[in-house]
Every structure is written in C-alpha cells, then in structure tokens.
Image (cartoon, rainbow, N blue to C red):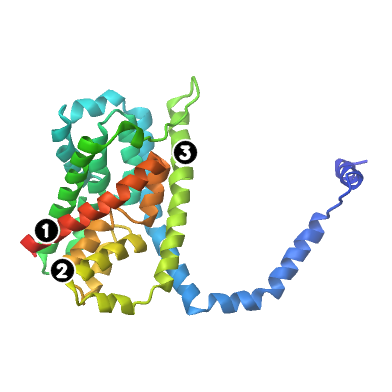
Amino acid sequence: MTAIDEDRDRRAQAGWNVDPVLILTLVLLLGFLAQGPVRRLLATPVLQSWLTVFVAVVVQALPFLAVGVLLSAGLAVFVPPSFFTRVLPKRPALAVPVAGLAGAVLPGCECASVPVAGALVRGGVTPSAAVAFLLSAPAINPVVLAATAVAFPGQPRMVVARFAASLAASCVMGWLWQRLGRPDWLRPRAHAHGAGEGCGEAFWGSVRHDVMHAGGFLVGGAMAAATLKSVVPSSWLYAAAGNPVVAVLALSVLAVLLSICSEADAFVASSLTQFSLTARLAFLVVGPMIDLKLFGMQAATFGRGFALRFAPVTFVVAAGTAVLTGAVLL
C-alpha cells in the first residue's frame, strides 16, 4: 500500500474523506459560474474608483516602504547605538532642529520615515529628535521639493513655503514631545535576534519584522483611503472652497483621508485650483505628517498609545504652521 492510500484510509477512518481533485473542480466551477456577476461588479464606477485609489496608494508607497525597511534594518544591525548620540547635539532642544534638517537627505516618503525613526529611537536617539526626523523627512527631502516645483511651475514661493512650514511643524512637535512626552508613550518594537546570530541573519530578520508590521498596516490604510475616496462626493470640495477657514480644514482632512504619498501629493494639490494657495499648502504639510496609513504604521511601530496622542496634535500643529507660513509667504 502506498503512502497516498494509507493517508486516504486514515482520513476515511477519521470520518472524512475529501478528494483534492473534487475540491479543485468545485472551485473552478464556482469561478466559471460567478464570472458574469464578478465582471459586472468590477465594471461599476464605484469599484473601479476604489481599485484605482487602492492600487495607486500601495504602488506609490511600497518602494519607499522597502527603502525605509532596509534603512531601518541597516541602522538596527550595522550601526552602533553610540553613533547617533555622538552625531546629534547633546542638548535635546538643539538636537530637534538638527534632526529635522537631517530629514532633508532621505529621498523617501512617510512610509520610509516611520521604520527609520523607530530604529533611531532603538539606537539611543532622544525621542524628541526622532519625532522631528519622522515628520520632516517625508516633506522636505529633495525629491518632494523637486516634485512640488514641477507641480507649481513659476511659483517658487510654494516650494519655499512647503519647506519652511514642514520644518517648523516638525521642530514644534519635537519640542512639544521634549516638554510634554513621557517615555512610556513611545514604545518602538524591538527586534528579537537570536544568540550567535550573524549580521546577515539579523539584518534580514529585521527586514521581515518591519515588513510584516508596517506593510500590513499600509495595506489596511490604503483600503480605508480608497473606501473614503469612493463614497465622498466631490461636490463637497467645491462648496468648501468659498470659505478660507473651511477650505483649510477641508483640504487638511482630505490629505488625511486620501493618504497620498508625499512624492505625488503636490500634483493633486496643484489640480485643486478652486482652493487658495494657503489651503493647498495645508494639504501638502498635513498629508506627509498624518494620514490613515501613517496612523496605522505609527501604531505598529511605536504603539497605539503613541499614535492616539500623536495624530491629533500633529494635525493641529501642521495645519496651524501652514496657515501662518501661507500668510507670510503666499
């Protein structure tokens, strides 16, 4: 008697005997019978819009998430914790703007900055400086500023305003965390490396850890953003543009809901011509600092308690600095 026959006999004695070929046949038959309804469902405008937004958010974010995960693993495994404490100023109040300016050298979006900031905290960097880096890196790096210049041709003030407002908001949040934050609010998940584990094994173990946590929340945030984008009527945006205060609030909330990658949000903002430049600046400042997918990723990286406290304060600070900067520069 072969091993297959023995296995079939054991399943029969246990009271169930499922033929894999029969299961596969039933699945194929159900798929064939349902292809008409599925095709009609996929052809509906709402679902097509949902799929477009979902795929766009995930495709835009995944490359930069991969960059952030690799950088995070490299920082966690190959860079000693003492390196960061030597580079940054000893005084936390000075370390915050230095870390904020350091965000300009990372050509990635918010999906990359979250795991990197987590590695910075694990490496011994003061949390206030890591917070400043977390918020500034997606908004003032060269790729984002270049995209903003292309999206707003002939308007260099928009590039300057985005840089100034984003850096100011990052520093304010870092100083606020230094003043009011508590260590138990910020709990970056540590990577468990086995004893005697080589650097290569530890590196890829760290990569798998961040991909499982941050990647899963990224997909969930993209699904939520696509759902909201598909059901909110666009006419509401046109009605909100007439009032300056409502316009800023509307575009700030829209930036949170859409969860657009910071490399692409300038082109969306430039298309909203019915809104003022200040309102569109708020869209560009708020989006890279707090949106649906970022909230999930921050909760996964630093803990839910951190995300619940951090998100509303960041929203208010980012929108406020955008309005003040717009009043001066725009």
Q: Identify the element where label 1 is drawn.
A: helix
Q: Which residue position is annotated with label 3?
A: 209
Instruction: Give percent across and percent down for residue 176.
Output: 20, 41
Image mark for residue 277: 2
Q: Is disc 3 surrounded by few (<14), some (14 to 19) or many (20+) residues within 10 Å?
A: some
Q: Which residue position is annotated with label 1?
A: 324
Quarter of the image that includes the C terminus: bottom left
Residue at the far right: name it. 1
Residue 181, can we see it? yes
Q: Is disc 2 surrounded by few (<14), some (14 to 19) or many (20+) residues within 10 Å?
A: many
Which image quadrant is residue 259 in? bottom left
Q: Identify the element where label 3 is drawn.
A: helix
Q: Which of marks 3 and 2 is nearer the N terminus?
A: 3
Instruction: Give percent across and percent down for residue 33.
Output: 71, 75
Which residue does the image show at 48% across and 34% down from the upper left? 205
Image mark for residue 271: none
Q: What residue type is labelled 1?
A: Leu
Q: How many marks?
A: 3
Q: Which of 243 and 70 is in front in this view?
A: 243
Instruction: Give percent across and percent down for residue 173.
Output: 21, 44
Which residue does the image show at 40% across and 45% down from the upper left? 299
Instruction: Give percent across and percent down for residue 150.
Output: 19, 65
Residue at the far front: name it. 180
Q: Is 281 above or below relative to 111?
A: below
Residues under numbered marks 3 and 2 in contact, where contact means CB atoms less than 8 Å apart:
no
Is residue 61 left or right of 237 when viewed as pictured? right
Q: What residue type is labelled 2?
A: Leu
Q: Which of 234 and 17 is in front in this view?
A: 234
Q: Which of marks 1 and 3 is nearer the N terminus?
A: 3
Q: Distance between the residues labelled 2 and 1?
A: 12 Å
Q: How far apart are marks 1 and 3 (CA)?
A: 40 Å
